[in-house]
């Protein structure tokens, strides 16, 4: 009797606990349905811990993720959905989890992760939503190379193939036309659905080129001191010099400068003018916040557009008429892996990746890792650090475990000669200086590969780069002894009474001259619609640097690599496997 009474009391107690959990869940769902996502997220959070008295843990976790998503906290939502997959793999709502995961990945332009999440969906009743999400997401993907890679991975997926066919229709490359014909035959489509009319060859005696630059004219002080947007002014001065040089060669450019004031609204107002609609080429805008209206304008009026300085392919990705003069971050990451694979001896391919916490770092790292898998490089460790925890790099690389009789370290937690190279994606001095310092402390032969941007900062002496054999990817490198470069610098000094370079390494006036000369020759040889000419020819710039846009790429595919020798920088040639 006594035992029976205890059992009854336990059952009553459990029921009493379950009732509040159920009521809390109902209240949380009500908040969610009313769109009060911040309150709903907190309410669901209290129900996430699993216990026998709380049967709502899985659902609370799921709606917690959705509440976070609706507030713009995609990373929080993604991590919670991944946690659900790990903790409750047999949950009956797993298809919905994967559907939302795919949506988040697509929002973040993580196309392959999104597609992988969709492949995990098995239920027939959700297939319609799956295909709708896929079509909507991939309709925003205009990068031809990414579409080709997706098709290689999912050759039977008709939605992927259709989006690729749409992209191929914007290309004039013969290989792309052949692939489009093969897709049309495979899936029973009409090629004419996708193939756009070939762009006409339009050549003119004078080409109108519009610059959309943040000159900030209304706020500049009329003094010889360095301005806050000095690189913009230097870029413009170099471009004007190139226009003069082109005129001597019979290439006439009408260069028209417009001040965006680094304001998207100003850009929109400029784009409403009739003279911009008549431009043959647009250069700029330079900053991402000004970018969207200009790209839409370029695509709508079919005016080719170039950004001469950014490495961020996102700024032109949605615009088939948009180009980068620089190689994209994806190409730099890819070529860096190819370079290290060719540069290092056969038996020394162990590599560490050290990355910061910016999106730029993530893009570089992802492309590097993707290419590394195709080579003999072995990625033995990946470290992601932010500037506030950069000291951890010293702990990883240079924590001593043994000392000699003079108290100098001779062995480390990461053993000497266990690593052959380090690819550093960050341009933050707090991060890359720790890498340099660690390698110097270790005194073993590790090749560090970083960015030419390091040379514009004084955090590391140039002599140390030479001493340690540091290699830098350098899209803007031209040898100092280059005859044409020297002529340009002398001419700039005569015109302006000062050196063209306002930074230790990067010379924006030179970049402006090189780019504008490249663009002028492109217009001369290919006309207003120079796509086919650019796609079929490797081009040498006026300073001898190669740029290549074949295969549908809209950013240069060639990345030089440099290092110091005898106090001077020189280009390292290598064979890309």
Image (cartoon, rainbow, N blue to C red):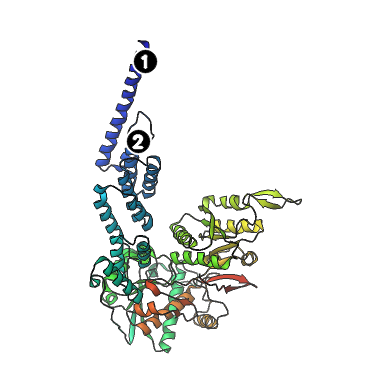
- The image quarter containing residue 183 is bottom left
Q: Which residue is mark 1?
A: 6
Residue 522 percent across, percent down from the top left: 39, 81
Q: Is residue 204 above or below residue 450?
A: below
Q: Residues within 10 Å of mark 2 (few under 14, many from 20)?
A: some
Helix, strand or loop at disc 1? helix
Q: Is residue 471 visible?
A: yes
Q: Residues within 10 Å of mark 1 (few under 14, many from 20)?
A: few
The residue beneath circle 2 is 57
Residue 205 appears in which quarter of the rendering?
bottom left
Say which residue appears at 43% left-offset and 89% top-offset: 248
Question: What is the number of the mark on residue 563?
Answer: none
- Residue 202 or 193: which is nearer the viewer? 193
Residue 173 visible, this orientation: no
Which is closer to the viewer, label 1 or label 2? 1
Q: Quadrant of the N terminus?
A: top left
Q: Is residue 551 above or below residue 347?
A: below
């Amino acid at each position: 009797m006594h035992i029976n009474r205890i059992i009854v009391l336990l059952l009553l107690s459990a029921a009493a606990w379950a009732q509040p959990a159920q009521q809390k869940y109902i209240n949380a769902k009500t908040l969610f349905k009313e769109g009060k996502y911040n309150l709903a997220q907190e309410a669901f959070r209290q129900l996430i811990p699993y216990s026998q008295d709380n049967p709502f843990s899985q659902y609370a976790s799921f709606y917690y993720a959705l509440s976070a998503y609706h507030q713009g906290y995609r990373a929080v939502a993604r991590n919670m959905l991944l946690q659900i997959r790990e903790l409750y793999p047999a949950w009956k709502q797993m298809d919905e989890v994967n559907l939302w995961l795919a949506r988040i990945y697509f929002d973040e332009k993580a196309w392959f992760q999104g597609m992988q999440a969709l492949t995990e969906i098995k239920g027939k009743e959700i297939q319609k939503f799956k295909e709708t999400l896929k079509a909507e997401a991939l309709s925003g993907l205009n990068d031809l190379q990414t579409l080709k890679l997706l098709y290689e991975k999912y050759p039977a997926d008709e939605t992927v193939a259709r989006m690729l066919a749409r992209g191929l229709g914007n290309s004039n490359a013969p290989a792309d036309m052949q692939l489009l014909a093969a897709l049309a035959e495979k899936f029973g489509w009409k090629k004419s659905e996708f193939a756009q009319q070939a762009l006409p060859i339009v050549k003119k005696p004078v080409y109108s080129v519009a610059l959309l630059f943040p000159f900030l004219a209304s706020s500049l002080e009329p003094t010889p001191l360095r301005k806050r947007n000095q690189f913009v002014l230097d870029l413009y001065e170099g471009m004007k010099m190139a226009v003069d040089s082109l005129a001597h060669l019979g290439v006439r450019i009408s260069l028209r400068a417009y001040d965006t004031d680094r304001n998207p609204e100003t850009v929109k107002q400029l784009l409403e003018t009739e003279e911009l609609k008549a431009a043959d080429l647009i250069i700029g805008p330079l900053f991402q916040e000004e970018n969207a209206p200009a790209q839409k304008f370029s695509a709508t009026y079919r005016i080719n557009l170039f950004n001469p300085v950014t490495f961020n392919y996102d700024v032109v990705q949605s615009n088939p008429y948009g180009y980068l003069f620089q190689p994209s971050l994806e190409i730099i990451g890819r070529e860096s892996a190819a370079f290290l694979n060719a540069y290092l001896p056969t038996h020394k391919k162990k590599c560490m990746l050290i990355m910061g916490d910016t999106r730029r770092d993530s893009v570089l790292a992802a492309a590097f890792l993707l290419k590394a898998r195709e080579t003999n490089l072995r990625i033995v460790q990946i470290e992601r650090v932010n500037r506030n925890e950069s000291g951890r790099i010293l702990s990883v690389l240079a924590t001593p475990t043994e000392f000699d009789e003079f108290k100098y370290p001779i062995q480390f937690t990461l053993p000497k000669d266990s690593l052959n190279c380090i690819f550093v994606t960050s341009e933050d001095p707090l991060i890359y200086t720790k890498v340099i310092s660690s390698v110097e402390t270790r005194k073993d032969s590790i090749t560090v590969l970083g960015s030419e941007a390091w040379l514009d900062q004084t955090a590391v002496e140039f002599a140390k780069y030479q001493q340690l054999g540091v290699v830098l990817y350098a899209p803007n490198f031209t040898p100092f002894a280059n005859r044409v470069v020297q002529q340009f610098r002398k001419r700039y000094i005569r015109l302006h009474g000062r050196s063209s370079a306002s930074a230790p390494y990067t010379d924006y006036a030179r970049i402006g001259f090189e780019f504008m000369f490249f663009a002028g020759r492109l217009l001369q040889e290919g006309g207003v619609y120079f796509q086919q000419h650019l796609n079929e020819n490797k081009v040498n710039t006026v300073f001898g640097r190669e740029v290549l846009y074949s295969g549908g790429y809209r950013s240069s595919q060639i990345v030089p690599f440099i290092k110091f020798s005898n106090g001077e920088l020189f280009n390292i040639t290598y064979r890309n496997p």
